[in-house]
């Protein structure tokens, strides 16, 4: 980030600020979700609609801000949400909530060093911004890749979730930004976080989260704390570099995996852990915060073995993979091949699963154990 003439510097600069804005939007919606004004019970309907307000709200905000900064209508954005449900007549109250959340967020742009719209956006403009993110990526040119809210269950539970924004250039991830509103900047905060039950009443007193970011070939990754209230984002003062852990002894290593069994085969991962000599209990974390934990040096290994036939989407990995790599780590599929972000919205050709490690030594051991265990597994 030191040299303004470097490739991707402007893109990264804007992307980081936009992710800060998105974090602010999500935190407001999450507070409404966890502290509803008039009742202390979360109804499942309200909770669904608030989740989607965050998803759509972030997608509209990021889409609008990126389009303003980079090429208007011609920008290519690959993102998770579409407008099908939101455009239906019966969704009008939800659309109203999304429009309000987006305008409130865009009005804060100057706090983050960006310029928002002169006038509040109308519903059709918000729908148009969401709908613009209909690119399918591919091997040629620049494509922005967004997961507006990654880890929906974590978001609903007041636990970990992430806003993930990346840019792919000619098939390779060029920049990666992860907003982690519930991941405090202090060391070991994720392990402490997972040890205490995240009671909702503690939400407001918690330390605040962070944004992590990197660009390809920099060999560096950075972290900034989120800002709150009337504070302005102080780029230079607040950023510090992050690095993967230097632990390469499996007995001392911490490994992360998805919380939900549906998303990853826990027993297969436990077998691998046993084979390579991991001693600690797995750290189960929602969302791409798992990649963040490896990049920050708080954990050494992330393993995910989805059920066969499940296709991983690029927005669930692009930003996290680049962060781990530039912070000094290694990421591949479970066969040891680097992930291929050039083939559309899916990670086509992915072999069995994903393995991210703080270094080559651990990575080699895990991949070796996957080959040895595969025959006997019944995935
Ligand atoms: Mg999502």
Image (cartoon, grey):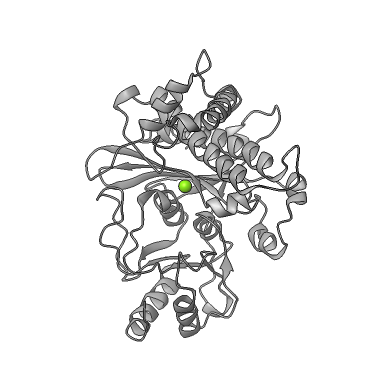
- What residue do we see at 35% from left, 62% from top? 310
116 vs 184, nearest the viewer: 116
Q: Quadrant of the C terminus?
A: bottom left
Residue 5, placed above or below residue 351: above
Residue 305, placed above or below residue 82: below
Q: Does residue 232 appear in the picture of this structure?
A: yes
Residue 178, placed above or below residue 253: above
Q: Does residue 226 appear in the picture of this structure?
A: no
Count of labels in the image: 0
- What residue do we see at 49% from left, 33% from top? 91
**In the visual, does 135 lie left or right of 325?**
left
**In the visual, does 86 lie left or right of 337?**
right
Return the residue found at the far front: 90
Residue 10 spot, x, y in % from top left: 42, 30
Q: Quadrant of residue 226?
A: top right
239 vs 340, nearest the viewer: 340
Residue 377, placed above or below residue 327: below
306 vs 275, nearest the viewer: 306
- What residue do we see at 45% from left, 27% from top? 65
Residue 99 spot, x, y in % from top left: 53, 26
Residue 326 spot, x, y in % from top left: 43, 53
Residue 276 spot, x, y in % from top left: 47, 82
- What residue do we see at 42% from left, 52% from top? 316
Q: Quadrant of residue 77?
A: top left
């Amino acid at each position: 980030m030191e040299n303004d003439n470097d490739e991707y510097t402007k893109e990264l600069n804007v992307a980081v600020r936009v992710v800060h804005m998105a974090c602010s939007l999500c935190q407001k919606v999450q507070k409404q979700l966890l502290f509803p004004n008039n009742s202390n019970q979360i109804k499942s309907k309200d909770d669904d609609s608030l989740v989607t307000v965050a998803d759509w709200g972030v997608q509209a905000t990021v889409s609008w801000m990126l389009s303003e900064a980079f090429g208007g209508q011609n920008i290519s954005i690959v993102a998770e949400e579409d407008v099908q449900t939101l455009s239906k007549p019966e969704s009008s109250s939800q659309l109203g909530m999304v429009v309000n959340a987006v305008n409130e967020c865009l009005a804060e742009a100057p706090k983050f060093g960006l310029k928002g719209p002169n006038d509040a956006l109308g519903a059709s403009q918000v729908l148009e911004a969401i709908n613009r993110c209909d690119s399918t990526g591919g091997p040629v040119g620049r494509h922005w890749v967004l997961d507006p809210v990654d880890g929906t269950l974590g978001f609903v539970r007041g636990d970990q979730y992430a806003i993930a924004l990346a840019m792919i250039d000619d098939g390779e991830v060029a920049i990666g930004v992860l907003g982690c509103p519930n991941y405090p900047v202090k060391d070991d905060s994720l392990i402490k976080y997972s040890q205490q039950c995240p009671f909702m009443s503690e939400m407001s007193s918690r330390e605040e989260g962070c944004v992590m970011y990197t660009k390809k070939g920099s060999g560096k990754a950075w972290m900034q704390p989120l800002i709150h209230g009337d504070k302005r984002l102080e780029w230079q003062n607040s950023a510090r570099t992050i690095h993967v852990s230097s632990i390469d002894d499996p007995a001392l290593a911490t490994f992360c995996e998805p919380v939900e069994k549906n998303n990853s085969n826990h027993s297969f991962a436990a077998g691998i852990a046993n084979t390579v000599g991991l001693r600690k209990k797995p750290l189960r974390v929602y969302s791409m915060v798992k990649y963040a934990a490896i990049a920050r040096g708080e954990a050494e290994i992330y393993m995910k073995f989805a059920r066969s036939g499940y296709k991983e989407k690029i927005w669930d990995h692009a930003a996290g993979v680049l962060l781990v790599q530039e912070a000094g780590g290694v990421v591949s599929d479970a066969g040891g091949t680097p992930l291929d972000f050039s083939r559309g919205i899916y990670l086509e050709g992915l072999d069995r699963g994903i393995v991210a490690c703080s270094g080559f030594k651990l990575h080699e051991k895990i991949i070796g154990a996957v080959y040895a265990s595969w025959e006997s597994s019944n995935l």
